Image: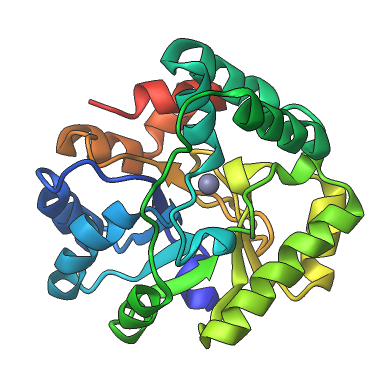
Amino acid sequence: MEKLFSNRKIVVYHKFCSNHQLEAHLSILQKEDVLITVDDGDVSFYKYLFPLLHKYKIPTVLFIITELIDTNKPFWWDELVYLLGKEEGEKRVWEVKEWPNQERVAYINQLRVESDKPSLKQAQLTTEQLKEMERAGVIIANHSHTHPMFNQCSEVELRDEFRQSKHFFDKAGLKGFNLFAYPNGNVNQLAEKVAKEEGISHAFLFDHKLPAKKYDPYRISRLSITDQTRPSKLRFILSGWHSKILPLRRSIYKLING
Ligand SMILES: [Zn+2]
């Protein structure tokens, strides 16, 4: 595992909207010996990226949110946008990430109850699809049970997240529980301590950085890209210069496209 994660450039994708530029991406990533990671386990990974992977043989890790597998439950941030409308919803997603976890959960529950819209459904990956991808060489790994912000959780909530996702991995017979990407990259000392105690061996950030000079298996840096990132921009991002001129994490979403 150390060979796979230390001193290697690592990119992170989320959702995929199309495969238009993915082959161009994969040939660049292959040449640079990059590790691909994908957060959240959106079904678009299975549709767009997974079918291309056998051709390029690039190591790939898919970080899943275990409570969503085999369900039609939406990502909570998509549900917030759905319930509040695009403009207010997107603003509120950023706000609630800074609230204590219980308050975020209670707020979304309340909105759901008060809304007269039909409940939002989102197709999620199935255990069978995860097993198929694991057999094909994709590492199916852990992105928590419900995707809370780990720096906003109590110790009880943190342990519960790890135990519930562990239960899912064990039951499904999937191997990657111990590889963990912090939701939104949010981490503090308590979250890191609990992660170690609950059996996590490697933890990944969302910091848009090249590998740190001193490798720390609990703070592994990743470069953020999307399927819309132009190939020339992807090369620029892999050079490390993009991270230097882009210190604000919140701007990453806006600037990595195009
Ligand atoms: Zn995530």
Residue farthest along the top direction in this orientation: 87
Quadrant of res 160: bottom right
Lateral position of residue 62 relative to residue 221, left or right: left
**Could you say where residue 65 lies in the image, as x and y percent from the top left?**
54, 58
**Could you say where residue 77 lies in the image, as x and y percent from the top left?**
53, 34
Q: Is residue 246 visible?
A: no
209 and 194: which one is in front? Answer: 194
**Could you say where residue 138 lies in the image, as x and y percent from the top left?**
35, 74
Q: Which color scheme did the rendering employ for the protein?
A: rainbow
Q: Residue at x 55, y 15 (%)?
A: 91
Q: Residue at x 12, y 44 (%)?
A: 21
Quadrant of res 255: top left
107 and 137: which one is in front? Answer: 107
85 and 242: which one is in front? Answer: 85
Q: Residue at x 65, y 69 (%)?
A: 165
Location of the C terminus by quadrant is top left
Q: Is residue 103 visible?
A: yes
Vertical comparison of 180 with 19: above or below = below
**Could you say where residue 41 lies in the image, as x and y percent from the top left?**
42, 57
Lateral position of residue 196 relative to residue 131, left or right: right
Lateral position of residue 99 relative to residue 217, left or right: right
Tag count: 0
